[in-house]
Image (cartoon, rainbow, N blue to C red):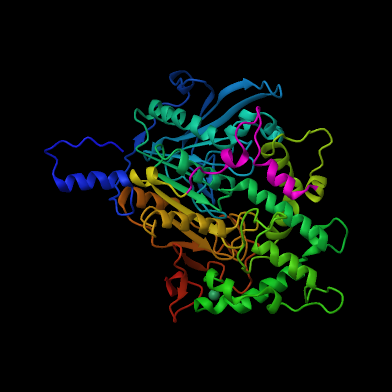
Amino acid sequence: MNVFVPNRLAGAALLSLLAACGGNGDDPIPQLTPATGATLGSCTDLTTRFSFANTTITAANAIAAGTLTIAGTPVAAHCQVTGTMYSRTSAVDGKSYAIGFEMRLPNNWNGRYFYQANGGTDGAVGTASGGIGGGGPLTNALQQGFAVISSDAGHTNAQNPTFGIDPQARLDYGYQAVGKLTPMAKGLITTAYGKGPDRSYLGGCSNGGRHALVAASRYADQYDGILAGDPGWRLPLAALANVAGYQTYVSLATTAGDPATGFTVAERTLVSNAVTAKCDALDGASDGLIQDTKACQAAFDLSRDVPTCTGTRDGTCLSAAQKTGIAKLFTGATISTGAKIYTSFPWDNGLATSGWGPTWKFGAPPSRDAGAIGFIWQVPPVDPTGFNGTTFAATSNVDDLYAKIQATNATYTENSLAFMTPPSPSNLAALKGRGAKLMIYHGTSDPIFSSDDSVAYQEALNAANGDDATNFSRLYLIPGMNHCSGGPATDQFDMLTPLVNWVEKGEAPNSVIASARGAGNAAAVNADLPAAWAPNRTRPLCPYPKVARYSGSGSVETAASFTCQ
Ligand SMILES: [Ca+2]
């Protein structure tokens, strides 16, 4: 590093300058100023007033208050602008591609911009209302006055998942659509309100959480606050591990070809109850929530704590083969060398749900993972003619796929781990250095993206920042929650408001209050909620490694009886 140092520069200033260059954990973090609002001038003429390179605005419609609602509450009047960017015809598959988007611009704007990162393999321009975390939230970013963008990330639903045959569509899905849309969105905001956004945020869950952590690495100069929910930040590896799990469950099935009979709902309830018996009280309250996830991993042993069948499987025991096969999946599915494909999954008590089993462990491998691996991530992609997801998931050689998702050739020059995962994930010096903040949440019963991978992400950040990165990045584990929502959990919360307060006021979020969604919930009832819980049970979500512990007095139904320790 060459630093020109004038002779008059005092020693202290020199040390300060060198420290700033070195990026150690003690650097002062700048405090960003709060956003200030503005009023939308006009809406429908944005089709002609706004122009941006490689962009076509297709419509601008005034949307009356109450046209959209969130949890029964009307969303205020706003302007919906739709368009496309980078329309093109692929030289590889001959198909037409574009990055479709919509923006929703509140008449009474709070001065902030929110990029709504969508889930799955994208492909749909979801309503740009700005989801803020958890299941059935009571508010959203649009309702709070943000200008929100949503996009399909460069392909339509009809092109899912074969868009991956086009190499540029792979890259747009992976990371480039966010990079192309962001300056356009800020430009449209500037035209609409006469000034650009004072503060910019990006958030989503699942693949949206992946987009969020990719943006934290790649687009740190563009965003002040990032909210990553149940992030599949190593999505191709998670999907392949899920295929390996599918093959294990098929091998354990009592009905040929039906993985759900390899680990039945009765057996999953048995294991969940056994985990509860060993782990529930570790946080001080036997309340059906395992809040000390880490201690639980040492306390529970599948082999020891669940009966082994001596005869026919009947839901009161697991066979020896089940114990071996299922324990290995929790430890982490491997290739034949013994190397983990992805990561471990923590023992928790949210395994008995339809979300855990039929949706993700048994249903996703043929319906989601197979097509994504085959068309979007492997090199070369499979031939779509005669493709069968069930056959692919059940019979593919996992070692072979593990190599193919890391391969490149002259047409597909970036492998899937390069374009899907955040580069240098533990180096967020750019994000930290400008005063931006990152909040991550993750359900500990997420069956597809493991909360252990978010723990590893945060711990790597800690290690790279003097053993504590919590002055700019915090992870909130959500006991019992399945993938982004559901499970026996308090899964209703607003994590955007505390993020804004952290970014703009310096109020570090020491806990976030979450609620159960029982009978009468204004947004949506969580069918997985145990009957014994109060329908509106609350808990503090705590920044890792702190966990919510019972204070020793007071109702277990209320957050006030728990503290983050
Ligand atoms: Ca407990």
Mark yes or no: residue 465 visible: yes
Q: Residue at x 51, y 62 (%)?
A: 477
The magenta stretch is 396-425
Between 350 and 46, the residue placed more toward the observer is: 350
Residue that sits furthest to the bottom in the current view: 552
Picture quadrant of ligand 1:
bottom right
Residue 563 x, y percent position in the rendering: 42, 71
Mark yes or no: residue 368 visible: no
Q: Is residue 225 left or right of residue 359?
A: left
Q: Main secondary structure of the magenta part?
A: loop
Q: Determine which quarter of the picture holds residue 2.
A: top left
Q: Is residue 248 left or right of residue 23?
A: right
Quarter of the image that includes the C terminus: bottom left
Quarter of the image that includes the N terminus: top left
Residue 339 vertical position relative to residue 295 in the rendered view, above or below? above
Q: Residue at x 33, y 43 (%)?
A: 434
Q: Residue at x 46, y 20 (%)?
A: 51
Residue 198 x, y percent position in the rendering: 34, 37
Residue that sits furthest to the left in the current view: 8
Between 321 and 7, the residue placed more toward the observer is: 7
Residue that sits furthest to the top in the current view: 48
Between 203 and 166, the residue placed more toward the observer is: 166
Residue 547 vertical position relative to residue 497 in the rendered view, above or below? below
Residue 462 x, y percent position in the rendering: 42, 57
Residue 421 shown in magenta:
yes
Residue 108 shown in magenta:
no
Between 313 and 193, the residue placed more toward the observer is: 313
Q: Residue at x 35, y 57 (%)?
A: 508
Residue 44 vertical position relative to residue 550 in the rendered view, above or below? above
Residue 132 x, y percent position in the rendering: 50, 49
